[in-house]
Image (tube, grey):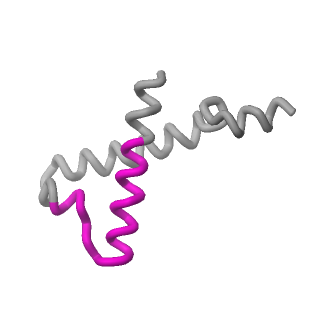
Amino acid sequence: MKTLHMITFALVIIGALNWGLVGLFKLDIVNALLGATGLETIVHILIGASAVYLALTHMNECKVCSAKSKS
């Protein structure tokens, strides 16, 4: 589970940075690296799925949040 968490966390960070660049500079890094291909679509789906996974498992994985729920 730690490996899955690390992969999903990395994908969410990549997605967040990409959206930041799109908002600031209209620069889509995922599209620039992969082009408008099926692979780009798959990467975007994986980033979205990673965000859902992290949202659902956050309370169990986060040391700060799990400490708050115990007190």
Residue 6 sits inside the magenta stretch: no
Instruction: Residue 15 in the image: state x and y as whole percent.
Output: 37, 54
Q: Residue at horizontal 15%, vertical 56%? A: 33
Left-right relation of 28 to 12: left
Check if residue 30 falls in the magenta segment: yes
- The quarter of the picture where residue 24 lies is bottom left
At x 42%, y 48%, the residue is 12
Prevailing secondary structure class for the magenta stretch in the rendered image: helix
The magenta stretch spans which residues? 10-32
Q: In the figure, 20 relative to 71: above or below?
A: below
Residue with the most extreme bottom position: 25
Q: Which residue sits at x=37%, y=47%?
A: 47
Q: Quadrant of the C terminus?
A: top right
Say left or right for 24 vs 65: left
Position in image of residue 20 (x %, y %): 39, 67
* Residue 57 picture location, percent across and down: 58, 34
Q: Position of residue 46 (x, y in %)?
A: 34, 43
- Residue placed furthest toward the top: 1
**Residue depicted at x 16% and y 62%:** 32
Of 44 and 2, the residue lying toward us: 2
Q: How many marks?
A: 0
In the picture, measured across the screen, residue 67 lies left or right of residue 22, that is: right
Q: Indicate whether 11 appears above or below 7.
A: below
